[in-house]
Amino acid sequence: MKITPFICIVLISQLAGCSNDSIYEKPVIPYAYKFKEMSHWVEATPSTDLIKHDWWKLFNDQVLDQLESKLDDSNPNLGIYLARLEQSRAYTLSVGAQRFPSVTAFGQLSDNRQSDNRPLRSASQPSVYGANSLGISIDYDLDLWGRVKDLVKSGQSLEKSSELDYVNARTGLQTELAFNYFELRKFDEQVTLYQATIKSYEKQLKLTRSLHDEGVVSGLDVSRALAQLETIKGILSVSEANRAKSEHAIAVLVGQSPSIFSIKPRMANDLTHPDVPVSIPSVLLQRRPDIASVENKLAAANANIGLAKTAFFPDVSLGLAAGFQNSGSINLLTAPNIFFALGPSAIVSLFDGGLRDSQVKIAISKRDETAADYKLIILKAFKEVEDDLSTLDSLNKQMTNATAARSATSHSFDLVMNQYFEGIVSYFEVVKANDDLLNANELLLNIKIQNLEARLSLIHSLGGGWIVK
């Protein structure tokens, strides 16, 4: 069989099909030279690693360091993303295997009887005969139109996207763990504050009862002092319950049972409030794994357009089958029994009612959808950084104001207590002074924790601990 004319036609068709490739172009996203809300924040230089891989060490807490180190090996959610990554890698290997010939071996030993009344059977044919064969078969898709190439490109991009999804999930869980830890320390400090307040209220109640026994004050003062004491005890119980819930959440994140997991109480004052270096916006696009992930999904969607277009061209393959074949004698592996079949084959759809056109349109629309999603994620990333910078700037100012307010409130409290025991003011003023002092302490504590959490949020918005290699 002469196949030269066939090969020439195929090569000409291949040249004509070169325009099938869909060129990938990353969408252009406009961004400013620097973040508007950067203010006093340190601007990182290109040679500086913005945030180290172990970014949580910026907060200078050994317990947090130990908890974060357990996350990789023990968190169940990470196991889910790791399994998805392995599936994606396996898919890439499976589509990549189509670039190579498939080789199969076959063998058959059979005795056969044909019907006496088989149509068109000649009189000389035996009713019973043997059929033995042994050989190999090789099939190779010539991939003239880039179908396999586009499949591999799409698979590789999706594999990279899965890898980045894993990194993004890991960074998110690290951030969630740190957030729960800061909340735990807030409740630790609340418990300490409320316990100290209870002691103060108990002392006030004791002194008020003494004044009541001496006839200096009425029973109303004793009732107010007792009511305020019982109220703060109830608030203490709420903080203790909230601390337990934060501890339970941390236990699950590090893959341990809450029933056997515990963290010793500790004040939040030891936590460092780090200055986070802020990069220029263009670096944000390189650092954030969610942005890089959707960019790879966009590349895969673009490759799928080329893949859909290959359906308009013939599926051309080259096949070879060779081996030994006879009618049942024992001398199968001899020269007269050799057979082979070699030649190309092509399959093309001539009419499908617009199916292929619609598949190309679907692929293009999915690419456009992913491109829009890519732009949206980038704009949200810029917004998150600007929000965090603005929040931190506001919290720094609030911290100064709250510290001054707490100092003034403490001084007012001392004056009211002195005036009460001198009989100048009623116990109502004492109750109000107690509430004001407690509120001032709570406000200062909340701002301090919010400041830590806002810095944590900024680190996450900047890409967490993901280092570009």
Image (tube, helix red, strand yellow):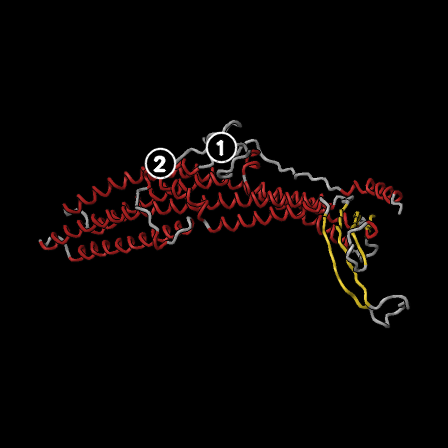
User: Exactly how many numbered labels are in the figure?
Assistant: 2
Q: Nearer the viewer, mark 1 or mark 2?
A: 1
Q: Sequence order check: which comes first, mark 1 or mark 2?
A: 1
Q: Residues within 10 Å of mark 2 (few under 14, many from 20)?
A: few
Viewer-proximal residue, 164 or 189?
A: 164
Which numbered dot is residue 433? none
Q: What amino acid is at disc 2?
A: Thr
Viewer-proximal residue, 446 or 128?
A: 128
Q: Residue at x 30, y 43 (%)?
A: 266
Give percent across and percent down for residue 49.
49, 31
Q: Residue at x 34, y 53 (%)?
A: 260
Viewer-proximal residue, 442 or 80?
A: 80
Instruction: State whether residue 415 is above or below residue 469.
Output: below
Instruction: State whether residue 130 is above or below residue 142.
Output: below
Q: Specify the farthest residue to the front.
A: 330
Q: Specify the farthest residue to the bottom.
A: 117
Q: Could you tell me if residue 345 is visible in this image?
A: no
Which numbered dot is residue 50? 1
> Does dot 1 land on a helix, a strand or a loop?
loop
**Distance between the Cα atoms at labels 1 and 2?**
28 Å
Which numbered dot is residue 400? 2
Question: Are the residues flagged by discs 1 and 2 in contact, CB closer than 8 Å?
Answer: no
Give percent across and percent down for residue 295.
62, 42
Q: Residue at x 60, y 48 (%)?
A: 88
Asked whether, in this view, residue 238 is left or right of residue 367, the answer is: left
Viewer-proximal residue, 263 or 239?
A: 263
Asked whether, in this view, residue 130 is left or right of residue 288, the answer is: right
Asked whether, in this view, residue 449 is left or right of residue 20, the answer is: left
Q: What amino acid is at disc 1?
A: Leu
Give percent across and percent down for residue 314.
81, 49
> Does dot 2 land on a helix, a strand or a loop?
helix
